[in-house]
Image (spheres, rainbow, N blue to C red):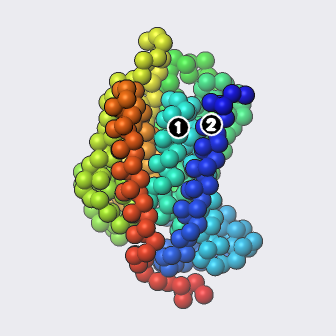
Amino acid sequence: MNRARLRYPATIGLLTLIAFGARAVSLDAQPLWRDEVDALRFATVPWAEMLASFTRPGWNGPLYYMLLRGWVALTGTSEYAMRFFSLAFGVLCVPLIYALGRRLFNRQAGFLTALLLTTSPYLTWYGQEVKMYTLLPALALLAIYGLRRAVEEGDWYWWTAQVVATSLACYVHILAALLIPMQVLLYFTWWPQARNRWRGALLSLACLTLPYLPLFDWQAPLLLQERATGFPSYTLGEMVETLLNSWSLGMTGWGWPWGAVLVGSLAAWGLASPPPSLPGPPARTGERRERLALIYWLLIPLLTVWLISLRQPLFTDRYLIWAAPAFYLLIALGLASLLRLGAWGRWVTMALVAAILVLHSVNLWRQATIPIKSDFRAAAA
């Protein structure tokens, strides 16, 4: 096997180790806060109550609490032990995004996206919290990767991976149900390649719909009615600004607004830049379809939450965390397009990557050293 084929897997392995270190070193820097204490409480209720939560109206994430129950039974209830559960899924997102980026575009795009996820202050933050917000993007990445492989190859095990990952995600967070219509759009985006996979696609949709029906029975009326939720109201523009700030700079926002403008501009360039000079028009058309898939991945959850919020405010950035990988993929495409511009493009790309890593590093340090959360350790004791 030549060195080029070995280089990328070895580098992704190194990035995975770095992602682990970046999250593990400050895993208990912030105190347990109220939502984390609630997660522990929900994970330790009697079994009858836990099983009933799968169909209880208004209950979010019953499967996560069941998994957390098993985890704390094995590891205990210390901050470090409980948060390690989230850390593991956050680290898993690094090789998953590389695999998906490589499948949709190329190794270079996969590597650059994996680098961004490795140092992302936003994803690091949620990889250090006793909640479902790293399990959710990991399942979304696995579902989309499975769908892509199923469309390409038609093998039953890729359809199975897609169905299982999506079904689990729906029971991990209420808004993961949006993965279903998003994947339907992705299927048609990958037309005509997807044309010969229509039987698998229909069976997949049926298998996704049936496990979701117990949730849909109470979710649809709940989401359509007008009610107080405890969330503030946001305009669509304010939602976009919040996501741009969070996904670019993390929880402390050091570098706002120029850092976020830089990162957001790269994502916009990744969407608008010309595709690489690949042989034949079909290849160029294929890359445009993949970029359209990223648009669906970003816009479907955002616009749905905005529409729901017109009647009942529902927006908080963490609810859309599973769309963040699409944003990082667009940034990687922007950087990769600059690399194709010759020697000066490579220097510009290196300077931009260095600037992003500085922004990430400073915000990682601030998240680890500045008290942000209220201390609820006593409540968990």
Q: Amino acid at mark 2?
A: Arg
The residue shown at (36%, 26%) is: 341
The residue shown at (64%, 79%) is: 78
Image coordinates of residue 113 in percent, x first then y, are 48, 43
Helix or strand or loop: what does disc 1 sit on?
A: helix
Residue extending farthest to the right is 74
Helix or strand or loop: what does disc 2 sit on?
A: helix
Which one is nearer the viewer's eye here, 226 or 330? 330
Q: Quadrant of the C terminus?
A: bottom right
The residue shown at (52%, 52%) is: 118
Q: Which mark is residue 110?
A: 1
Question: Relative to residue 373, is residue 95 depicted above or below?
Answer: above
Question: Relative to residue 309, is residue 300 depicted above or below?
Answer: above
Looking at the rendering, which quadrant does residue 215 occupy?
Answer: bottom right
Indicate left or right for 123 with 209 as reference: left
- The residue pinned by badge 2 equals 7
The residue shown at (46%, 48%) is: 116
Image coordinates of residue 190 in percent, x first then y, are 50, 24
Which one is nearer the viewer's eye here, 252 or 201? 252
Which one is nearer the viewer's eye here, 156 or 359? 359
Q: Which mark is residue 254?
A: none
Q: Amino acid at mark 1?
A: Gly
Gap in Å between the C-alphas at discs 1 and 2?
13 Å
Q: Foreground mark, 1 or 2?
A: 2
Image coordinates of residue 256 in percent, x first then y, are 27, 59
